[in-house]
Image: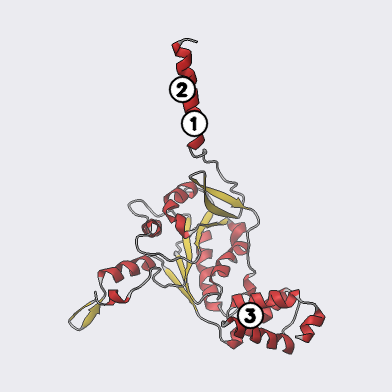
Amino acid sequence: MDALEQFLLRAEALLARVEAVLPPVATAPDWDAPAFLWRRVGGRGALIAVHEPHTVDMARLTHIDRQRAQLLRNTRQFVKGKPANNVLLTGARGTGKSSLIKALLPEFAAQGLRLIEIDKSQLSDLPDVVEWVSGRAERFILFCDDLSFEEGDDGYKALKVALDGGISHRTENLLVYATSNRRHLLAERMSENREGWARDGEIHPGEATEEKVSLSDRFGLWLSFYPFDQEAYLAAVAQWLAHFSLSLDATAERAALQWSQQRGSRSGRVAWQFACDWAGRGARERKAD
């Protein structure tokens, strides 16, 4: 074997090793799917099609009529190609924030709405997501669930750019809908209150506070969700029991209240969990409760 053949064999072996560690070539997702997950596969971000996403019947979501009406109006404007806002849904846990976003798909999928769920740990990939969807005819909602940041998170700056567009124009067919238990999305510390200053009798927040408020300010629409009282909780229980073809009789009501006391919480999520437990029991076991 001459020197040239040896060189070519060694070059082929080297290329084989390099190809093994390179990320795979990105392939276009199935755009007919109603929803997508953004995941990192082999070191490269990819849109994974979800053909049967988990959705919720919007009529089952109780005591959030104002929030539902505002989100529907904003989304309706968006799918029609009219101006619309990024939306931040904040407040008590289990009150329907995420479910309300998921419930948009059955309402608007036929009009071209698509949902992309992205984990907050992968928000630094947002420029890649924008590149994938830019120019397509569909209307995409980027769904960030339980969003919050700690100091130094890379996703914080990437999200700010996605919301405002940075030096380039904001992508016309993409909105961000995020849920969070924090109004300003970042932890707020007592020490930051000492950074504030006063002038002419007016209090001005410090730089750290201003920076944190600046992110939530980039969401044009804020929707707040509040803890359920007993009436709201029982109304949610009745809706979810009806989903299982059951009614909220006196026995079920007593059991539902006991369930919420054991959980130390009244919310739509707790109501759903009780309904699942109650429907899973036999009729004899429900009467004996």
Going 55% across and 68% down the picture, which residue do you hit?
98
Q: Which residue is mark 1?
A: 17
Task: Tell me, yes or no, whether the two marked residues, 1 and 2, touch with CB atoms within 8 Å.
Answer: no
Q: Is residue 246 visible?
A: yes
Q: Which residue is at the far front?
A: 1
Residue under numbered circle 3: 236
Q: Secondary structure at mark 3?
A: helix
Q: What label does residue 275 carry, if any?
A: none
- The mark total stands at 3
- Name the foreground residue: 252 vs 126: 252
Label 1 is placed on what type of residue? Arg
Residue 95 at x, y percent in the picture: 55, 76
Whether residues under marks 2 and 3 lie with C-beta atoms below 8 angstroms apart, the answer is: no
User: Whole-Å distance between the Cαs marked 1 and 2?
Assistant: 10 Å
Where residue 88 appears, as percent x and y from the top left, is 45, 68
Q: Give how far apart the Cα atoms at labels 3 and 1 are.
A: 58 Å
Residue 115 appears at what percent x and percent y?
55, 58
Provide the residue designation for mark 2: 11
Closer to the N terminus: mark 2 or mark 3? 2
Residue at the image position 35 percent from the left and 73 percent from the top = 188
Indicate the amino acid at tag 2.
Ala
Position of 121 relative to 188 (above/below): above
Say few, some or many: other residues with alpha carbon within 10 Å of mark 2 (under 14 / 14 to 19 / 20 or more): few
Report the front residue among 27 and 155: 155
- Quadrant containing the C terminus is bottom right
User: Tag 1: Cα neighbours inside 10 Å, few (<14), some, or many (≥20)?
Assistant: few
Q: Is residue 219 above or below residue 254?
A: above
Q: Which residue is more in the foreground, 263 or 230?
A: 263
Q: Secondary structure at mark 2?
A: helix
Q: Amino acid at mark 3?
A: Ala
Q: Who's the residue at 40% across and 59% down the image?
A: 163
Percent of width and height locating residue 171? 43, 53
